[in-house]
Amino acid sequence: MAPSRLLSHLQDLRNDIVFLRADIDQALRRYELITEGETLPDALQKDLSEIENLLGFITYTHSNMGRLLKQMYRGLPSRSEVAIQDEKKQSEVSLYNDSYSLHEGKCIEITNLLKNKLKTFNRKSVLLRVATNDLESEGNIRSMLTKRLQSVEQDEIKLKQSIEQFRYYLAHPNEIPDELRNAE
């Protein structure tokens, strides 16, 4: 006869506590998991954590892209400078533009990774919802995730509009509005 898996897990937990490999809060959490099983939020925690890390990285990158845009707008020539091509200003704007493009590329790469994680999460979430019949927890998690995704999407839309506007005005320096030159 094979030893009981429950007994084996409880003995491992006891040893971790005795030899100080687990703190008391972690031990209590593991004990509850061993004796009561996993809830839907517990089962999805790792996936949600990975998704949140990716969303955090995208948000951080969007923030950097916004700062780069402000720097690029400050580098736009004034009306008096339009006739005089200031090479230093042009090279600074070009560097900011290149940096922005690198950030944009990294965002696209992370967004593709996020899409794959979301597909995996959705499949797992549906299976767990059916198994646990915990519609409320899944609804709360999906609602929170949807709000976060919408916020990131809105930031991305604003950045795309801004960079398109910047690139248009860069190509047409005589049409640059004064308020864009003084972007803060």
Image (cartoon, helix red, strand yellow):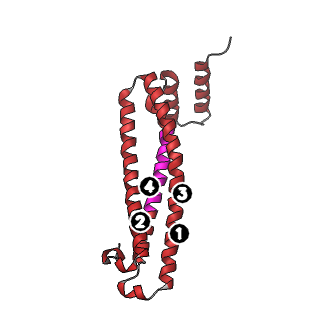
Measure how far apart labels 4 and 1 are at the Cα level: 19 Å
Residue at label 1?
98
Mark closest to the chain's N terminus, 4 or 1: 4
> Which residues, given as a range, are shown in magenta?
46-64
Residue at label 3?
106
Measure how far apart labels 3 and 2 are at the Cα level: 18 Å
Amino acid type, label 1? Asp
Q: Please say if the residues under marks 3 and 1 sit with CB atoms less than 8 Å apart.
A: no
- Kindly identify the residue that appears in the image at 62 percent across and 16 percent down: 4
Mark closest to the chain's N terminus, 4 or 2: 4
Measure how far apart labels 1 and 2 are at the Cα level: 14 Å
Give whichever of 183, 13 is nearer the camera. 183
Residue 9 picture quarter? top right
- Expressed as whole percent of the image width and height from the top left, the position of residue 65 reads 45, 63
Relative vertical location of residue 32 with respect to residue 45 in this rendering, above or below: above
Residue at label 4?
59
